[in-house]
Amino acid sequence: MAKPFHLAMFTSFNMPAWRGPWAGEAADDWWTGDYHISLIKQMERAGFDFIMFEDSTYVGEHYGGSTEVSLKHPLGVPKMDPFPLLPILARETKHIGLIATGSSTFYPPYILARVMATMDHLTGGRVGWNVVTSSEDIAAQNYGIDKLLDHDERYDMADEFVEVVKALWDSWEPDAIVQDRENGVWGDHTKVHTIDHVGTYFKVRGPLNFPAGPQGHPVICQAGGSEKGRALAAKHANAIVATNPRVEYLTEYRADIRARAEAYGRDPDEVKVLFQVSPVLAETDEAAKELYEQRFELRDPLQAERTLAGISGTTEIDFSQFDLDEPFPQDLTTNGHQSILDDWMRRNKGKTLRQAISERTQFGPPLYGTNATVADQLEAIADATGGDGFLFMFPTTRRYIDEVCSGLAPELRRRGLIREDYPHATFKENLLAF
Ligand SMILES: Cc1cc2nc3c(=O)[nH]c(=O)nc-3n(C[C@H](O)[C@H](O)[C@H](O)COP(=O)(O)O)c2cc1C
């Protein structure tokens, strides 16, 4: 039997499905956080370890050279800042981890360190930070930057950024608060230190103006796939998320990350590698197969356009210029998610664009069936890869959340494959417990 694994959900603070038979009221009640509150409660009941909010700050206009398609579907918009949402979700739950994305290219490290530490206090030690370098010049232009640094240099900058943030979290020694009421001394000034960081990209004096929260260093999450991205993840992260349909890739990826973590002097078990999945669930395997084909074969031209516009957004390549039913060029380059683009082109050589995006839409290995069938598949993948768990995504409807939380997760729990409870106080302790 496979060892128990972790479950997580990948989403955005954006509008869930707004049309289709299961959209319900979510398009109206997400603005206040209500949709995500119902989601997080379901997830905690089911034994999920965390929710992860990706983020970006642009309105896409690379597909067809216009924002039309981004607004029409809509795609990437509307998307609000996930940071203020986390403490709200924490108030509605007791244990589940809450991760939001903060860009090392756009945030000043002092603000990021301060916001994360504040949230760690507000949530009793349940937050995490997804470190990204961002990939779009049109986002950079919102921060006074005309053009992003090159992909690899962004990772050099991210590494320095994380080092600064950690130093700020460490700028108060654990016993800096004495709270000696008798002698009227609250804090010991000899235990609060400037960091005096002067590096290639940042100059930060410190200290933080309050001590770090219950986790000390909140959980760090990362999703790098390139050489530099993997190095950053292995050096700093506790939760690493990877996306690829091939189980062999995922096996290699996890082994590589663990070896790199060890080379950095870390215990590789402090690094949990979760694989992105989007299983299609139904009452019978046949019904699930039919749904799977409907969802991913992209016969619906609107769905195909939406998928292509999404790829255009993160690569800044105009995919509207290629014929959907012809093979597409194999020499595309981007300053954005290059490792994902390279791997996708390599695997889809000779296929038409429609076939290639069908695979891309699935986020992970093809999985469909009843709860029992999909539980078998997840168990087999975890066994084969040594994987630490799965990051679910798509589609964003209350129905899908319920399918996963009330159907699949209980099946996994019956098999002893996921947690029964949350024995520790903080997110990080629970995540690293197995
Ligand atoms: C599950 C997952 C979540 C991600 N979330 C974000 C995000 O919120 N914002 C962002 O700019 N990039 C995000 N990325 C992109 C990664 O940070 C990274 O750039 C990408 O995986 C390519 O790796 P590379 O940069 O090492 O080539 C995400 C990637 C994955 C697989």
Image (spheres, rainbow, N blue to C red):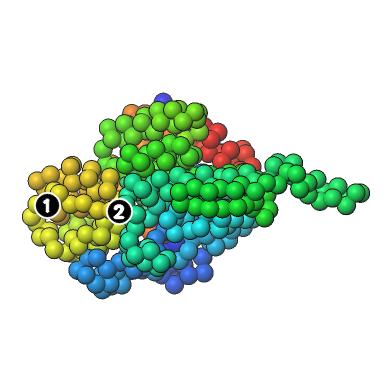
Q: Which residue is mark 2?
A: 336
Q: Which secondary structure lies at badge 2?
A: loop
Bin the neighbour count of mark 2 within 10 Å (Cα to Cα): few under 14, some 14-19, many 20 and up. Answer: many
Q: Which secondary structure lies at badge 1?
A: loop
Residue 19 percent location from the top left of the image = 33, 69
Q: Nearer the viewer, residue 287 or 66?
A: 66
Residues at discs 1 and 2 in contact (Cβ within 8 Å): no
| Amino acid type for the residue under numbered disc 2 | Gly
Q: Residue at x 45, y 44 (%)?
A: 159
Residue 27 percent location from the top left of the image = 41, 70
| Amino acid type for the residue under numbered disc 1 | Pro
Mark 2 lies within 8 Å of ligand 1 (Cβ measured) = yes
- Indicate whether 192 appears above or below 376: below
- Indicate whether 254 appears above or below 163: above
Q: Nearer the viewer, residue 22 or 219?
A: 219
- Indicate whether 16 appears above or below 285: below
Can I make out residue 208 in this image?
A: yes
* 122 horizontally vs 107: left or right: right
Q: Residue at x 48, y 40 (%)?
A: 236
Residue 251 percent location from the top left of the image = 32, 31
Q: Nearer the viewer, residue 408 or 175?
A: 175
Disc 1/disc 2 C-alpha distance (Å): 18 Å
Q: Which residue is mark 1?
A: 329
Bin the neighbour count of mark 1 within 10 Å (Cα to Cα): few under 14, some 14-19, many 20 and up. Answer: few
Can I make out residue 403 in this image?
A: no
Sequence-earlier tag: 1 or 2: 1
Which label sits in the foreground, 1 or 2?
Answer: 2
* 319 horizontally vs 37: left or right: left
Q: Residue at x 84, y 50 (%)?
A: 185
Q: Residue at x 26, y 38 (%)?
A: 246
Residue 392 percent location from the top left of the image = 39, 48
